[in-house]
Amino acid sequence: MREHRIAAIPGDGIGNEVLPEALRVLDRVGAAHGFRLAATVLPWSCERYLTDGAMMPADGLDRLREHDAVFLGAVGYPGVPDHVSLWGLLIPIRRAFGQYVNMRPIRLFDGITGPLRDATPRMVDMVVVRENNEGEYSEIGGRLYQGTPEEFAVQQSTFTRRGTERIMRFAFELAAERSGRVASATKSNGIIHTMPFWDEVFGEFAAAHPDLSTEQLHIDALAAGFVLNPARFDVIVASNLFGDILSDLGAAVAGSIGIAPSANLNPSGSHPSMFEPVHGSAPDIAGRGVANPIGQIWSGALMLRHLGHEAAAREVESAIETVLATTDARTPDLGGTASTTEMTDEIIRALPSA
Ligand code: ATP
Ligand code: MG
């Protein structure tokens, strides 16, 4: 039986509730498809930071390197600033392992009422491809003259040709496998150095792929489009900052942030990729067993696909779709009363192999 070594990091808050449930689904599917996930559970979290002064041990990255994939719950804890979990765990992993793609599928499932309600065309099925390693989220910059009227802050964005080309390549290849449409998020009217460069590289890829339908939209118009007519989009390629904003907006349009999955991919496979739900640790509902497990389970399906188990991944996605379309099982974020475990049980029941 084929075995995959998975580094499972539940993290904080509801991460501890949804991650074990997702593993339950994946184990079940693996047994039916002839593979096994050997999960090493690593208690790396903001809670660890509070007791030990670091989110992960000093050799943390080396330990992760020995695995085929990282499966993460969520990190974040009241009183611990967000930049601690970001720069103490997520960003080091994304960068050390060359996870330059952040892929976030967005679907409005049948049986879910999004905030746009009847105004939303049903066929919302898109993927935000966010550049994950460079762009606006940089360490370059600083503050000067603090406490004086002349105080100012500067933050430098970096867009390399290599980094921009590789995210475009991933987006165009994904669009070719899907419905053949790719939209680029830009703001070259206001950001006059980096964004025209981004547009130029997008234009080169568009010219090289005459078979694909391409368009470039300013981020403000694109955000409005997500609300007014999300069904027109398929693959959206965006910088680190724009992709971050669009994927949360997309998750909201699709009904609940509790559903949305994400994959931090190193497409070459030279280092492990990382799979995590879009939502955070949700301290407001943590410990009550009511978190929606779908975001974590769907992230698990993306992990199976990355590990080469396309059929198994599809089974998990179809089970989610079936449960939402044909049963009343809903966690409170979707207006129901099901617990995290009940929701997971329902999804397991909907697996063809169950
Ligand atoms: P972070 O800083 O880690 O992103 P956050 O507070 O900004 O945390 P979330 O933790 O995602 O963001 O929480 C945002 C809101 O969505 C909260 O009200 C939370 O309860 C809700 N939420 C998040 N994830 C889920 C889930 N899986 N099921 C139900 N509700 C959720
Ligand atoms: Mg947040």
Image (tube, rainbow, N blue to C red):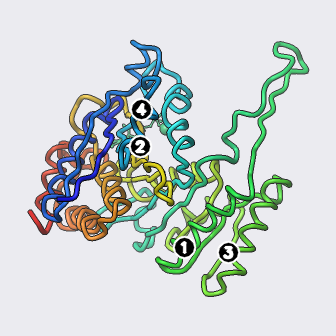
Residue name at image x 48 percent, y 20 percent: 80
Q: Are marks 1 and 3 in contact (CB under 8 Å)?
A: no
Q: Is residue 274 left or right of residue 10?
A: right
Residue at 35% x, 56% y: name it: 303
Q: Amino acid at mark 1?
A: Glu
Of the 4 image quadrants, the one containing the N terminus is bottom left
Q: What numbered label is drawn on residue 279?
A: 2
Label 2 beta carbon less than 8 Å to ligand 1: yes
Residue 245 visible (yes or no): no
Q: CA distance from mark 4 to mark 2?
A: 10 Å
Disc sitting over residue 215 in the figure: 3
Q: Secondary structure at mark 4?
A: loop
Asked whether disc 2 touches disc 1, contact meaning CB atoms under 8 Å apart, the reply is no
Residue 222: x percent and y percent? 64, 63
Q: Which residue does the numbered mark 4 point to in the structure image?
A: 75
Quadrant in which the C terminus appears: bottom left
How far is mark 1 from mark 4, CA to CA?
Answer: 31 Å
**Residue 236 visible here:** yes
Marks 1 and 4, the one that precedes in the sequence: 4
